């Protein structure tokens, strides 16, 4: 059990309703300040009426029960593809039947199993969960002599193990999460600024990689803060907060941040704010998520303070649609190309959670318009004409993540329809006999398969759409909180 009294410096878990909070509503007032957004909504409605193939026009949405059953069956199709050919390895290659080491060649962490733990629980796949838990408890080795990517290890392994612990009650999973965190901690504590090095050797604690993208600097307070609460040891939370402070104290006079910072000198490597695109994206997500999960008002107010400038300086309304442009953090002057990464699609959901439904809905419509043009979303588009910049499609969850967030907050049927359309497109185009795969080439009318089921597929993609349709009693829809990797860090029942 949690013993908060053992660690008075730790923030307490939030009992507040996460959705539509008063704190977030402060941002609602900024909606009208962004030029073109109100017009964008009107233009969007007009465009929607004219579109040749609008969301589900003429197609019936299945019942919630039918949809949930279909999604669960497809998740298990992917799961059994993995268990048949790649069990114990990080990732499956579903076309060839091979496998992939995600962190380092020759080193496996059974990543897909760790990623799947809480999804299997939510979906009621209890036999599969027992098998997965047993493998992790008996085989996962946090002591390997390998340089590991700190950001990925925190969101996937530490987060996955904590979510596994919360959903199964396994003390061994929590213990493994703590052991990984202990071995990752030198990346933070050996840094002169507190900004974590990108890599650390799990056995020796030797850290390296001082040029740190913001997502890598800031996407840790949810896992580390919760771990601190669970084990009564503030070191993890303290390290995460020190890293955030180190970055945020170096904001420009416009309260904008660069994209990459040097962990040793604290100097910006560049001066361009590329939010919400990668490699910044989840830096802001964890200000909000950490604030809610940990009941930490400092994080929540940082989220508000550092989100307003993004909306003010980076919003770019083109053809009635909201996108985000890179800017010089010091001057607010626009820089770089008009590209948008699919990874940024999560931002619609984040804006909604932060209380700004106007921009959230507008940005989601922009991505729905991109969905109209392609079988599945390409990795990167030029938002001025929807042309493809990067023709891959890495089986990503961000659009579904936002559909889930927006549906949960508004209850609007349009987001449920969007979630179903996304699921059907993925099932049609990225399902193969051995599971689900990435695409290495997408055009407006075709998809050429690659050969990988990324680990996050087991944590995120179908979990979001399952939650939309299943009404599972295993999740508290009112107060549940998911990490950037879709891990249920609060609200498992
Ligand atoms: C996941 O690992 C997480 O969602 C992360 O925040 C961003 N990228 C992938 C999925 O695309």
Image (tube, helix red, strand yellow):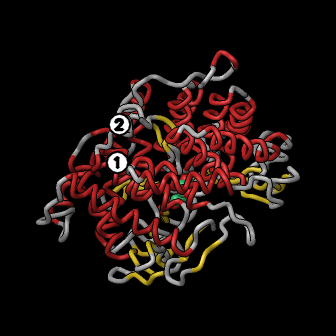
Q: Which residue is mark 1?
A: 467
Quarter location, residue 198 = bottom right
- Label 2: state its secondary structure: loop
Q: Is residue 482 visible?
A: yes
Work out whether 307 lies above or below 338: above
Q: Is mark 1 within 8 Å of ligand 1?
A: no
Residue 121, x across and y down, in percent: 44, 48
Residue 246, x across and y down, in percent: 74, 37
Q: Which residue is mark 2?
A: 477
Viewer-side residue, 94 vs 385: 94
Q: Residue at x 49, y 55 (%)?
A: 459
Whether pointer 1 and pointer 2 mark residues with C-beta atoms closer than 8 Å, the reply is yes
Q: Residue at x 88, y 52 (%)?
A: 204
- Label 1: state its secondary structure: helix
Q: Residue at x 52, y 32 (%)?
A: 293
Which quarter of the rendered picture does the N terminus lie within?
top right
Mark 2 residue crowding within 10 angstroms, few (<14) / some (14–19) / many (20+)? some
User: Which mark sits nearer the N-terminus, 1 or 2?
Assistant: 1
The residue positioned farthest toward the left in the image shown:
58
Q: Residue at x 47, y 77 (%)?
A: 439
Q: Quadrant of ligand 1?
A: bottom right
């Amino acid at each position: 059990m949690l013993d908060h009294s053992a660690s008075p410096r730790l923030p307490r878990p939030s009992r507040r309703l996460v959705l539509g909070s008063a704190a977030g509503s402060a941002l609602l007032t900024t909606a009208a300040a962004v030029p073109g957004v109100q017009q964008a909504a009107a233009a969007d409605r007009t465009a929607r009426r004219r579109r040749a193939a609008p969301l589900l026009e003429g197609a019936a949405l299945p019942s919630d029960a039918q949809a949930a059953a279909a999604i669960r069956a497809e998740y298990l199709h992917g799961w059994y593809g993995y268990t048949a050919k790649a069990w114990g390895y990080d990732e499956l290659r579903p076309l060839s039947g091979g496998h992939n080491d995600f962190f380092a060649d020759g080193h496996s962490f059974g990543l897909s199993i760790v990623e799947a733990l809480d999804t299997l629980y939510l979906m009621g796949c209890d036999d599969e969960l027992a098998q997965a838990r047993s493998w992790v408890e008996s085989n996962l080795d946090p002591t390997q002599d390998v340089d590991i990517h700190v950001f990925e290890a925190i969101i996937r392994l530490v987060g996955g193990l904590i979510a596994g612990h919360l959903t199964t009650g396994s003390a061994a999973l929590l213990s493994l999460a703590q052991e990984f965190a202990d071995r990752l901690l030198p990346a933070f504590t050996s840094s002169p600024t507190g900004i974590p090095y990108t890599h650390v050797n799990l056995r020796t604690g030797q850290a390296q990689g001082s040029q740190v993208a913001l997502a890598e600097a800031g996407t840790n307070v949810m896992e580390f803060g919760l771990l601190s609460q669970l084990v009564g040891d503030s070191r993890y939370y303290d390290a995460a907060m020190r890293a955030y402070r180190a970055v945020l104290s170096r904001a420009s006079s416009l309260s904008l941040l660069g994209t990459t910072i040097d962990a040793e000198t604290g100097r910006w490597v560049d001066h361009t704010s590329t939010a919400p695109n990668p490699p910044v994206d989840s830096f802001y997500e964890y200000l909000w998520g950490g604030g809610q999960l940990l009941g930490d008002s400092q994080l929540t107010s940082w989220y508000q303070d550092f989100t307003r400038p993004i909306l003010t300086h980076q919003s770019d309304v083109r053809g009635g649609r909201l996108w985000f442009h890179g800017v010089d953090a010091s001057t607010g002057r626009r820089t770089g190309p008009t590209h948008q990464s699919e990874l940024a699609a999560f931002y619609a959901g984040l804006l909604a959670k932060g209380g700004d439904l106007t921009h959230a809905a507008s940005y989601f419509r922009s991505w729905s318009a991109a969905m109209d043009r392609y079988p599945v979303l390409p990795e990167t588009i030029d938002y001025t004409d929807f042309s493809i910049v990067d023709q891959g499609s890495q089986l990503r969850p961000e659009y579904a993540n936002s559909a889930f967030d927006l549906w949960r907050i508004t209850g609007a049927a349009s987001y449920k329809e969007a979630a179903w359309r996304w699921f059907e497109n993925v099932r049609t185009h990225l399902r193969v006999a051995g599971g689900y795969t990435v695409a290495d080439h997408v055009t407006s009318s075709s998809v050429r398969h690659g050969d990988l089921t990324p680990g996050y597929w087991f944590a995120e993609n179908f979990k979001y759409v399952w939650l939309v349709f299943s009404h599972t009693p295993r999740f508290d829809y009112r107060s549940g909180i998911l990490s950037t990797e879709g891990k249920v860090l609060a609200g498992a029942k």
